[in-house]
Structures are given as structure tokens and as C-alpha cells.
Image (cartoon, rainbow, N blue to C red):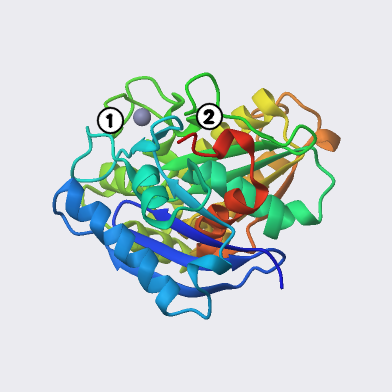
């Protein structure tokens, strides 16, 4: 039997866990739970119960599990096993998520930022298996925009001096532009993400629509929404162009709900602009033959949960909890 790990992902509104086996994209006994707006202690209790329930619902006991992978947005402290997620009710607090999981299950625990884990999911289970690119990027376009970058030769996730890089969604694309959740202005994700199209539509039409309504209307060809999407796509091409110029990855895999659900109006338009820019070198300095391969993830919405399994299977020393 193959190596098996327990994967756990916490997002802004739900958390998920499941059993992942080396060599298979299938996640077994997936358990999903809405995050209650309770205290930090209740949150941790819920996480531990969720993981136990996954084991209860599976054929495996904890003895059959080799390691546990835990992913969350935000910055991890590998020495303390704590994370500071940006979008939970107790936002300013550090949560001893990794430490509590380690104490409870007494297994090796690997932790990582969610988008960084997303790139490792591509390497182990997705396009990374097919490509010979040394540098692979995973770009998620959802309510925000995030990038994970991996060097296959050195087996390293690029995460910068403080472990948070590359925070590419907060690159400025317009001076004095829309206000970002981080407090800045004109950041890429305020134009290119799901929240970005909401901002652009509100400015153009003077009314608030959901991101889904905007993407759907653009897909139906409704003119004013098509124009909103085109503007957003332009900023996305600017952002992806910055990634290409800065890191020159061989492959960029795109994920996130808008990319998966509205592939043509989100991913298709970015690809079209980068391949046929309005002006030569409008977005990228590199020549066409050196452009990275641009792909949509085949791992769907499960990319990040698979990523939690991938970090536990890959056993990168950097990701191992030091407690
Ligand atoms: Zn920002």
C-alpha cells in the first residue's frame, strides 16, 4: 500500500480535511465544516474534531497515517507551530494550530501557506508531473490573488525572508486605485480578482453585483459586463506579466473559482492578451518563444487540500514543524 497522509486546509469560511495517498489525486473521506464565529479555543477544538471524524469515516487508523499536512493562509511560525491567518474572527491572534494537531495525533506535522501548498499539489499531482519546467508557478485568482513558486531542481518553495512572499496580489497596478483589504490602494487584486470585478462593475454601472453575476453576464455576452471583464483581464495580464518578468517560470498553472467556473472570460482573456498584446512587449519583456506555458489546474477546487497532502508527502525540511 502507498504512503498515506492526513491533509487539512483552513480557508476564510470553511475548513476541510481528507486522506491523501501518494500517486493518487483522489481524496478520501473528505470532511468539510463551516467555521463558527466563536473563540480561538473553540476553533481549535473544531479542527481537532474534524480531523478525528475524517479518520472515523475512513478505513485508516492514525497508525496507518505517515504524516499530517496543515495549510492556512497567513504566516507560519515553524518553531512554535503557530499561524496568523488574515481572515478569521480572531485575526490579530496567532493560532497554535500545528502544535495542537501535533500534540493530539503525535505524528510528524508539515505546515505551509495555502498557495505555496497549491504549487506543490501541481508538482505532485497536476501539470508538474508532465512538464520539465524547473520553475513552476501556481496562481490563484479568487476573492484575492496569490502566487506560489517552486524550484524543482532545488526542491524549494520560494517564500522570501519572512515566509510570506510572493504577495503578488498586492503589487500596485494603478496609482490611487481601489482600496485593498490590506489598506493599500490600486493593488492588483482590487482589479483582477472576484472582488476586483465587483469594484469595476460598481464603478461603471453604479450598482453592486456579485462576482458570479458579473462573470455569468459576461459569458452571455452582455456588453457592459464584457467591458468590465476586459478591463479586469487587462490588469490580470499586467500582473501575470510582472510574474513572468520577475521570475520567468517555465509553467504557470491557474486556479481559483473564477478561473475554474468562468475559464474563457478569466483565463482565456489573460492568455489572449499575453500572446497577442496590444503593443509589442506591453506586458512582458521576454520574447514569445520564452513565454511560460499557461495552464488551468486539473485538480479543480481540491487543489489546496491536495496541497496539504503534498507537503506531508514531500517532507520538505522547511515545512516540518520544529516542535
Ligand atoms: Zn493589498
Question: Compared to 94, does 310 lie above or below?
Answer: below
Q: Which residue is mark 2?
A: 166
Q: What is the quadrant of the N terminus in the image?
A: bottom right
Q: Residue at x 64, y 57 (%)?
A: 296
What percent of the width, then of the height, locates residue 151?
Answer: 72, 35
What percent of the width, then of the height, locates residue 21?
Answer: 64, 67
Q: Residue at x 58, y 39 (%)?
A: 148
What percent of the width, then of the height, locates residue 227?
Answer: 44, 49
Residue sitting nearer the eye, 275 or 45: 45
Residue sitting nearer the eye, 73 or 323: 323
* Among the two numbered marks 1 and 2 on one chain, the one whose residue lies closer to the N terminus: 2
Element on which disc 1 rests: loop
Q: Residues within 10 Å of mark 1 (few under 14, many from 20)?
A: some
In space, the residues marked 1 and 2 are separated at their CA atoms by 20 Å
Instruction: State yes or no: discs 1 and 2 in contact (Cβ < 8 Å).
Output: no
Question: Compared to 232, does 128 lie above or below?
Answer: below
Q: Residue at x 41, y 24 (%)?
A: 174
Q: Is residue 233 left or right of residue 183?
A: right
Q: What is the quadrant of the C terminus in the image?
A: top left
Q: Which mark is residue 179?
A: 1
Q: Which mark is residue 257?
A: none
- Image quarter for ligand 1 equals top left
Q: Residue at x 19, y 49 (%)?
A: 41
The part of the image, by quadrant, that contains residue 87 is top left
Amino acid at each position: 500500500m502507498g504512503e498515506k497522509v492526513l491533509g487539512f486546509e483552513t480557508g476564510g469560511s470553511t475548513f476541510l480535511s481528507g486522506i491523501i495517498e501518494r500517486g493518487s489525486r483522489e481524496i478520501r473521506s473528505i470532511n468539510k465544516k463551516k467555521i463558527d464565529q466563536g473563540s480561538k479555543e473553540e476553533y481549535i477544538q473544531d479542527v481537532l474534531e474534524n480531523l478525528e471524524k475524517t479518520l472515523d469515516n475512513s478505513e485508516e487508523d492514525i497508525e496507518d497515517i505517515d504524516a499530517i499536512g496543515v495549510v492556512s493562509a497567513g504566516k507560519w511560525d515553524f518553531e512554535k507551530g503557530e499561524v496568523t491567518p488574515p481572515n478569521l474572527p480572531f485575526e490579530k491572534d496567532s493560532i497554535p494550530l500545528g502544535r495542537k494537531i501535533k500534540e493530539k495525533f503525535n505524528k510528524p506535522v508539515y505546515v505551509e501557506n495555502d498557495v505555496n501548498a497549491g504549487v506543490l499539489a501541481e508538482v505532485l499531482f497536476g501539470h508538474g508531473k508532465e512538464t520539465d519546467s524547473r520553475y513552476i508557478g501556481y496562481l490563484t485568482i479568487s476573492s484575492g490573488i496569490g502566487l506560489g513558486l517552486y524550484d524543482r531542481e532545488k526542491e524549494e518553495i520560494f517564500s522570501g525572508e519572512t515566509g510570506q512572499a510572493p504577495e503578488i496580489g498586492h503589487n500596485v497596478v494603478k496609482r490611487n486605485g481601489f482600496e485593498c483589504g490590506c489598506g493599500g490602494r490600486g493593488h492588483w487584486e482590487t482589479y483582477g480578482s472576484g472582488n476586483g470585478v465587483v469594484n469595476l462593475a460598481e464603478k461603471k454601472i453604479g450598482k453592486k453585483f456579485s462576482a458570479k453575476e458579473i462573470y455569468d453576464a459576461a459569458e452571455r455576452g452582455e456588453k457592459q459586463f464584457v467591458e468590465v471583464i476586459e478591463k479586469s483581464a487587462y490588469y490580470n495580464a499586467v500582473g501575470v506579466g510582472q510574474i513572468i518578468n520577475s521570475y520567468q517560470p517555465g509553467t504557470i498553472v491557474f486556479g481559483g473559482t473564477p478561473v475554474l467556473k468562468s475559464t474563457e472570460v478569466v483565463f482565456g482573456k489573460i492568455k489572449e492578451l499575453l500572446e497577442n498584446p496590444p503593443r509589442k512587449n506591453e506586458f512582458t519583456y521576454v520574447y514569445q518563444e520564452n513565454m511560460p506555458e499557461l495552464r488551468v489546474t486539473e485538480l479543480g477546487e481540491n487543489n489546496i487540500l491536495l496541497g496539504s497532502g503534498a507537503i506531508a508527502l514531500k517532507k520538505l525540511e522547511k515545512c516540518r514543524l520544529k516542535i
